[in-house]
């Protein structure tokens, strides 16, 4: 056998396709699968929350409380004053079960609906509102979340999201980082939609309780300048945010109030117990 | 959001740098293969040709470690979701194999032949999921020098 030098023509050991195209195709496929799984499971959750009675909810979440005990201000005058306000506001809703106000020491002005019938209020919220009407609107907003069972929907969706991500890609992998923004986007859009609904119902609640909607936008007007600075850093960030922008909420509330001829009368000041917070 | 930007940056960095590095590497491989075309390299045990009088022989090795870029790794992890050929790694091992053989040849430019060639592949960072993987290819054989 004679040796004849030569090299093979072409390379059969590598695929001659475009990696960019392959990437886009696979990425689109995975995103579509995960997104549809997420949306379908989300719909299941919407159905399932109707079958979770308040009693069951209270039972399941009895042992859960927000944050660690040391930040919680228990049995304070402020908490009781808010509890009275919530009880009065509740008469304007058809919520059949008792709600409990939890006051938590925090510098972030915020409040949210926590499963098990708890409204968690951060202490600096009291500094962000000037009148009782302003506070009542925020509390009414949380009442609306309970009425719509958004607290369960939100929690259910988070669980589905986390479970999907870790089941499919392994928690914290690079693939999760790739797909997560898409799911976050859809979650944010859903959440913003629920928030707007809760705003609208809260408006109806305080209109029922006070006979006017003065002070409804107070809280948003306080936080709008703070949030505004943050939003300027990224033009797209509000698409990924769980709440609509404060300015848009204010505009929406004003529009709704005008449409339904809800008057905006003079607001009632916070009572002494609640406003004492500012002096501290 | 910031995470997404960092991710996109890493991805495009991997894509463009990885691509240009691969292109340059292939050009160099093809050139050097052409240069060494007249040195027979076989996996057989025996010297090729009529003249089989060996005056000298010794072990020659050539090894190379090539890392996969970020883009290729993500592409492979996407691929592992659906199954099929992991095409993004094909060029990686192909380049490593050819480079290792070339380095082995370059270690003995005066040899007449290299016989009994073997190739070994091992992956570095094996089992450490979060690391960027690399592949090592070792080529070894016997360089023989024939009587003139």
Image (tube, helix red, strand yellow):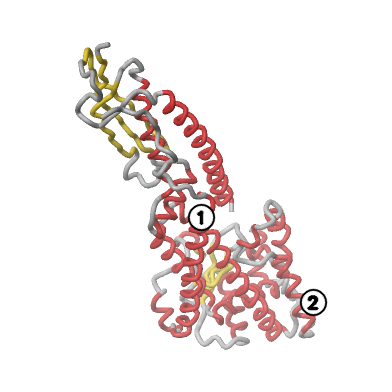
Q: Quadrant of residue B144?
A: top left
Does dot 1 land on a helix, a strand or a loop? helix
Q: Residue at x 48, y 70 (%)?
A: A38
Mark 1–mark 2 Cα distance, whole angstroms, equals 51 Å
Callout count: 2
Question: What x and y, as percent, mark residue A47?
Answer: 48, 82
Quadrant occupied by the C terminus of chain B: top left
Q: Is residue B23 left or right of residue A220?
A: left
Mark sitting earlier along the chain (1/2): 1
Q: Chain of mark 1?
A: A
Question: What x and y, as percent, mark residue B143?
Answer: 27, 20
Q: Nearer the viewer, residue A113 or A43?
A: A43
As drawn, A117 above or below A129: below
Does dot 2 land on a helix, a strand or a loop? loop
Q: Quadrant of residue B136?
A: top left
Name the disc covering residue A178, or none: 1
Q: Is residue A175 left or right of residue A255?
A: left
Q: Which of label 1 and label 2 is nearer to you?
A: 1
As drawn, A227 above or below B10: below
Q: Chain of mark 2?
A: A
Residue assigned mark 2: A266
As drawn, B18 above or below A197: above
Q: Residues within 10 Å of mark 1 (few under 14, many from 20)?
A: some
Quadrant occupied by the N terminus of chain B: bottom right
């Amino acid at each position: 056998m004679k040796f004849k030098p030569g090299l093979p023509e072409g390379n059969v050991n590598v695929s001659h396709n475009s990696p960019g195209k392959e990437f886009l195709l696979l990425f689109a496929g995975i995103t579509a699968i995960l997104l549809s799984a997420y949306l379908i499971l989300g719909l299941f959750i919407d159905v399932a929350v109707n079958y979770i009675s308040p009693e069951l909810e209270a039972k399941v979440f009895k042992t859960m409380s927000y944050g660690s005990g040391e930040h919680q201000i228990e049995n304070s005058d402020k908490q009781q004053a808010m509890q009275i306000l919530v009880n009065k506001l509740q008469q304007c809703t058809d919520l059949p079960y008792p709600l409990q106000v939890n006051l938590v020491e925090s510098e972030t002005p915020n409040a949210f609906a926590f499963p098990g019938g708890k409204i968690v209020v951060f202490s600096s919220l009291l500094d962000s509102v000037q009148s009782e009407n302003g506070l009542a609107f925020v509390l009414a907003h949380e009442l609306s979340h309970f009425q719509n069972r958004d607290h369960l929907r939100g929690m259910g969706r988070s669980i589905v999201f986390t479970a999907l991500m870790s089941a499919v890609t392994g928690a914290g992998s690079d693939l999760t980082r790739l797909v997560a923004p898409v799911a976050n986007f859809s979650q944010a859009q859903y959440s913003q939609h629920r928030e707007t609904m809760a705003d609208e119902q809260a408006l109806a609640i305080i209109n029922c309780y006070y006979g006017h909607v003065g002070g409804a936008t107070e809280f948003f007007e306080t936080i709008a300048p703070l949030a505004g600075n943050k939003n300027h850093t990224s033009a797209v960030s509000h698409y990924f945010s769980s709440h609509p922008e404060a300015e848009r909420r204010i505009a929406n509330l004003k529009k709704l109030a005008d449409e339904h001829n809800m008057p905006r009368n003079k607001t009632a000041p916070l009572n002494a117990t609640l406003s004492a917070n500012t002096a501290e | 959001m910031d995470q997404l930007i960092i991710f996109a940056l890493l991805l495009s960095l991997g894509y463009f740098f990885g691509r240009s590095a691969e292109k340059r590497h292939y050009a160099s491989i093809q050139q050097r293969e052409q240069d060494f075309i007249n040195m027979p390299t076989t996996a057989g045990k025996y010297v090729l040709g009529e003249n089989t009088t060996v005056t000298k022989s010794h072990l020659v090795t050539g090894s190379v470690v090539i890392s996969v870029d970020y883009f290729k790794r993500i592409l492979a992890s996407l691929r592992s979701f659906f199954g099929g050929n992991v095409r993004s790694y094909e060029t990686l091992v192909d380049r490593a194999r050819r480079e290792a053989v070339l380095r082995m040849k370059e270690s003995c430019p005066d040899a007449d032949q290299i016989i009994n060639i073997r190739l070994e592949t091992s992956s570095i960072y094996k089992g450490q999921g979060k690391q960027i993987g690399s592949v090592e290819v070792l080529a070894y054989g016997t360089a023989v020098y024939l009587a003139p």
